Amino acid sequence: MSITRAGRAVVAIAAVAAVAFGAGTARAATSAAAPTQAVMILLDVNTSFATADFGAEQAAATAYLNALPSDVRAGLITFYGVWTLVTAPTTDRQTVAAAITSATQVGTRSVGLAPALAAAQSALSGLGPSVEARVLVLSDAEEITGSLASPGIPVDVVTWSFDSDDSASTLQSLATASGGQAATPASAASLASAFAAVAPSPSPAPTPAPVQSHHPVAAQAPLPASAPWHFSGPLLAEVGALVVAIVVIVLAVSGVATSGRRSRRLAGQVARYGPSRARSKLTDREGDSKVAAAALGLANRALQVRGTSRTVAERLDEAGMAMRPAEYVVLGACASFVLALCLTILIGTFLIGVPVGLVAGWLGARLLLSVRIARRRAAFNEQLPDVLQLLSSSLQSGFSLAQALDAVVREGSQPAAGEFSRALGEARIGADLADALDSVATRMDSQDMRWTVMAIRIQRSVGGNLAEVLRNTMTTMRERASLRRHVKALSAEGRLSAYILVALPILLGGWLFYTSRSYMQLLYTTTFGLVMLCSAVVLVVIGGFWMRALIKVEV
């Protein structure tokens, strides 16, 4: 019995899931023998520390680490505006010491201490209920206001104070409330004596966990990355849903690829008895990948279901883009996913990066198409006076209107030559020439072209010299174009001011996010910040439309 490609994919996915489940179970069994002593070191890496002071902070942390009993498991969390789990609790002192030494300064505040304490508590509680756990905080408490909640385990502190916004008293109050101790940087090693009274319990040391970054919101999770991996009910449900989703995607892609190959074979048989046609750049080439064919098939089906395939095709034709609607949709979707991935990596949370990236990519694709259409229409309107001059000269030389249009097609430039070629082709297969030219005016949204068609219709009805009529129309168009350029020059200052006022908050916000992320993250990690951010976006959009209405002058 033969196995289909989808069946082989399902078997492979099931095997991977089984291996992952076995590895997780083995890891959980290995971590069952937990140590009886553990400490999490919280190292403040904000830039308020001078280089020498930061070196002293690292030295104090290293001295405390070296003074710990050999069986005490130690881990490291660095924090500033956000916190980062650098090393999970382990008895490998060299790994922890190297992590302390290689820590770099970033951020300007210490407000990530509260979520870092919660993360340390979760990581230590995950080692087991019988563990004697403590937390060591080394910080100057830069811009920390109010009191800090006790994490439920003793917290020892080593404090610095450089200026008026350093809240060393807050850390000392935390140590008192939690049953911990406070020490100066020079006597940090003495805090390790808190583990001397606890009997050692030998246990194998697991390998350190990889470095993982978290924002303050992620610190509220019940099982952070520092805790051992337990296969709970929700985790098994998520793994099962992921496997089912992958199986469905594989089956759908395999089915679409099979139907696509079948339809291409049928189309090839029919094409043997008909004229050859131009092949699409992306879909009809020999040797196309199966993934591309499947994606184009899905996009084509989606457009047909929504009934927008014809609309998208017309807009692509108006923009002068030689691609099919399915190709445009696939390229736009790829760009959206890439943008979503970049924003997720930049922001650090998929809850904002994915939706914002997808919406921005979709809007960007539509904006690109609209800009291409607008530029092509503007180029047509600029070429129209020259086209009318050529038509007028040809008519005056004795050519008919159709012959004059043929001269425009042969000697003109794009997009005017292409549009008049379309109208001439429609006239040759039986359509009225005036109606064909009127469709050109509609496609190009050209009021000047509509007046030209109106002049041609009137001349056909009442007679007269069409060459002279077109020459007068051309003169009027050129005068209006000159006036339009004059108005554009006078309104250039207003348009430049509008561009600057709209772009300034966006560029400034992006620069602040790049240089001081902890300062800007309040805009998307708190409810009040999200309200402010949405309000700012709405106000910028309203202001942009308002200034556009002020500087737009109709001629």
Image (cartoon, grey):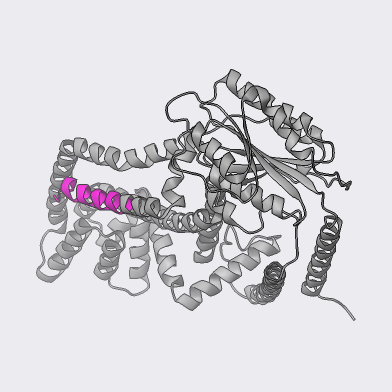
Q: Which quadrant would residue 185 be assigned to in this image? A: top right
At x 64% / y 68%, what residue is drawn? Answer: 294
At x 43% / y 71%, what residue is drawn? Answer: 310
| 522 or 283: nearer the viewer | 522
Q: Is residue 553 one of those drawn in magenta? A: yes
Would residue 442 be visible to someone looking at this image? Answer: yes
Q: Is residue 406 one of those drawn in magenta? A: no
| 428 or 480: nearer the viewer | 480
| The N terminus lies in quadrant | bottom right
Q: Tell me where residue 95 appears, x and y as whole percent.
A: 78, 35
Q: Tell me where residue 44 appears, x and y as whole percent.
A: 59, 34
Would residue 417 be visible to someone looking at this image? Answer: no
| 234 or 75: nearer the viewer | 75
Left or right of residue 541, residue 313 in this image: right
Residue stretch in magenta: 537-555
Left or right of residue 172, residue 75 in this image: right
